[in-house]
């Protein structure tokens, strides 16, 4: 089965059919005049400028955020409106490939034991707040426990260097599910290592922990 490849860049033309050099694409929340940035690549990460300024071919990288509706307003370099289109959708969650990092730790967790450690085999983005992810302890702790979440790049792992903190999972006294402290999305490259480790000071009962960390590719 074959499919038609979509044009990989946003491109616009002027009234004469020539590339809209220096044209401006303003991006807003659908139905409003509230600015809402698109991204510079499919991985998310950096916001595009708003407006997005088109290059000498009338092109630009325009990647709408998943599950978000936009209003696009295209203008000339002199800010003369060419068209306005509302309710433009990015890819929806059902269209995005999810990658799950799953682990099971049996028994009471000792100090800084690995709850889960994974070598990433394809570029993956972990969302802010680790939305859609879970850390569950069958045996709840007697005191609050904080489990660090780290990322070790392929280069650091090769050199034997430690990873860097990217967040944590906090389980309250008597609770079974953790809440994540994960301020912003994190990109993982192939060969990077993602890890969740037990608390530095072990809890007497905290154990039998399952994790399900969800990213997108």
Image (cartoon, rainbow, N blue to C red):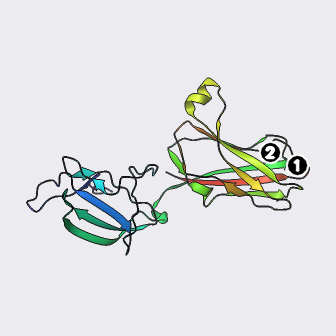
Q: Position of residue 93 (x, y in %)?
A: 49, 64
Disc 1 is placed on an element classified as loop
Q: Quadrant of residue 117?
A: top right
Q: Quadrant of residue 210?
A: bottom right
Q: How many marks?
A: 2
Picture quadrant where residue 197 is located: top right
Q: Which residue is mark 2?
A: 199
Outermost residue on the front side: it is 78
Q: Where residue 99 sits: x, y (%)?
A: 56, 52
Picture residue at 18% right of the left edge, 64% below the top: 80
Residue in the foreground of this view, choosing between 49 and 10: 49
96 relative position to 137: left or right: left
Contact, CB < 8 Å: mark 1 with mark 2? yes
Residue 103: horizontal and vertical position, in percent?
A: 70, 49
Q: Residue at 84%, 46% (x, y): give it.
A: 109
Decide which of 119, 40 is in the foreground and name it: 40
Residue 112 shows which numbered tag? none
Task: Kindly identify which residue carries mark 1.
Answer: 203
Above or below, comparing residue 95 to residue 47 in the picture: below
**Mark 2 falls on what kind of element?**
loop
Q: Residue at 65% of width from left, 35% of height from top?
A: 163
């Amino acid at each position: 089965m074959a499919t038609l490849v979509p044009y990989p860049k946003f491109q616009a033309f002027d009234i004469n059919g020539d590339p809209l050099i220096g044209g401006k694409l303003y991006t807003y929340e659908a139905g409003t005049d509230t600015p809402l940035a698109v991204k510079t690549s499919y991985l998310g990460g950096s916001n595009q400028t708003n407006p997005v300024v088109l290059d000498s071919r009338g092109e630009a990288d325009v990647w709408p955020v998943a599950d978000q509706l936009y209003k696009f307003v295209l203008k000339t370099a002199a800010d003369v409106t060419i068209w306005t289109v509302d309710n433009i959708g990015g890819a929806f969650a059902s269209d995005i490939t999810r990658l799950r990092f799953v682990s099971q730790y049996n028994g009471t967790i000792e100090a800084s034991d690995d709850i889960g450690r994974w070598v990433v085999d394809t570029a993956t983005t972990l969302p802010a707040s680790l939305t859609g992810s879970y850390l569950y302890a069958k045996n709840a702790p007697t005191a609050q426990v904080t489990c660090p979440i780290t990322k070790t790049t392929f280069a650091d792992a090769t050199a034997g260097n430690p990873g860097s903190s990217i967040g944590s999972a906090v389980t309250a006294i008597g609770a079974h599910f953790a809440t994540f402290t994960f301020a912003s999305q994190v990109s993982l490259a192939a060969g990077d290592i993602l890890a969740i480790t037990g608390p530095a000071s072990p809890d007497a009962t905290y154990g039998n922990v399952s994790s399900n960390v969800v990213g997108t590719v």
